[in-house]
Amino acid sequence: MSREDCIRILIADDEAGFLKALTTYLAKPWREILTARNGAEAISVLESCEVDLVVTDLVMPRVDGLGVLGRVVESGSRTLVILMTGYGSIETAVRAVSQGAFDYKTKPFLLEEMGLAVARAEAHLRLVRERDRLLAERDSLAREIHELKTLAISQGAPGTLPPRTESLRLDVLERAPSAREAFSWYRMWQPDTSLEEEITLLTELRNQGLLTHEQWIRLRRRMTSACG
């Protein structure tokens, strides 16, 4: 299973029996579960590898759960934190959430309750990963489009065209006008080029998929009529 498909969970609790029970219950094929017996061990794990979700007890020796939460927040990572404690209070819950905790569970709780909380955290993490994937895909497509436009500009017409024509071609390709807009722009700009050169620009628009073949034919006819 790739890292993208795996959810890495760190469970931190100083009660060995409860830690083992929770680890066993949360074990799933798509989860990699790490454990820590106190807050200091949890922080050491966080510093040594990437963790998606931390399930930590609030009251632990050396470093408590809020200390672990603070370390996650300070790191700027997207790691989610679920706090659990047998000394729950509204004030502690509010403080934990205000400091960035994803969820809060008060002991004693059913293992099923923690299972639901972890499932919600996983759903959130997968949405974030999907968003990142789509953004990366968008950026990759944008780069490809830019490269194609650059290639079209460099190969679409003789290098002896006047600078004004080169600028016009770039503007048209970047702004992707409709057929009607393209025609009005040509009429408004009145570039110092021949009709043949303007038709070359329209051909580039068609080749880039900015104009359909039918639009290109109609525009060419209109331009020929307007300049005749």
Image (tube, rainbow, N blue to C red):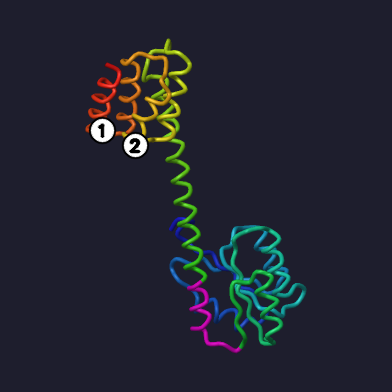
Q: Quadrant of the N terminus?
A: bottom left
Kindly identify which residue carries mark 2.
178
Marks 1 and 2 sit apart, C-alpha to C-alpha, by 9 Å
Q: Quadrant of the C terminus?
A: top left
State which region is magenta.
108-120
Horizontally, residue 46 falls left or right of residue 110, namely right
Instruction: Residue at 60%, 89% (x, y): give it.
Output: 108
Q: Nearer the viewer, residue 202 or 58?
A: 202
Q: Which residue occupies the extreme top position in the image?
A: 160
Element at badge 1?
A: helix
Instruction: Residue at 36%, 30% (x, y): give it.
Output: 184
Q: Position of residue 42 (x, y in %)?
A: 67, 68
Q: Nearer the viewer, residue 157 or 36?
A: 157
Element at badge 2?
A: loop
Asked if the stretch drawn in magenta spans residue 213, the answer is no
Indicate whether 71 appears above or below 93: above
Residue type for callout 1:
Gln
Q: Position of residue 68 (x, y in %)?
A: 70, 69
**Quadrant location of residue 165?**
top left
1 or 2: tag closer to the N-terminus? 2
Q: Are marks 1 and 2 in contact (CB under 8 Å)?
A: yes
Indicate whether 31 appears above or below 169: below
Please, what is the dominant secondary structure of the magenta stretch? helix
Instruction: Residue at 35%, 13% (x, y): give it.
Output: 194
Indicate whether 222 appears above or below 180: above
Q: Position of residue 76 (x, y in %)?
A: 66, 58
Q: Position of residue 163 (x, y in %)?
A: 48, 16
Residue type for callout 2:
Ser
Q: Which residue occupies the extreme bottom position in the image?
A: 108
Kindly identify which residue carries mark 1.
215
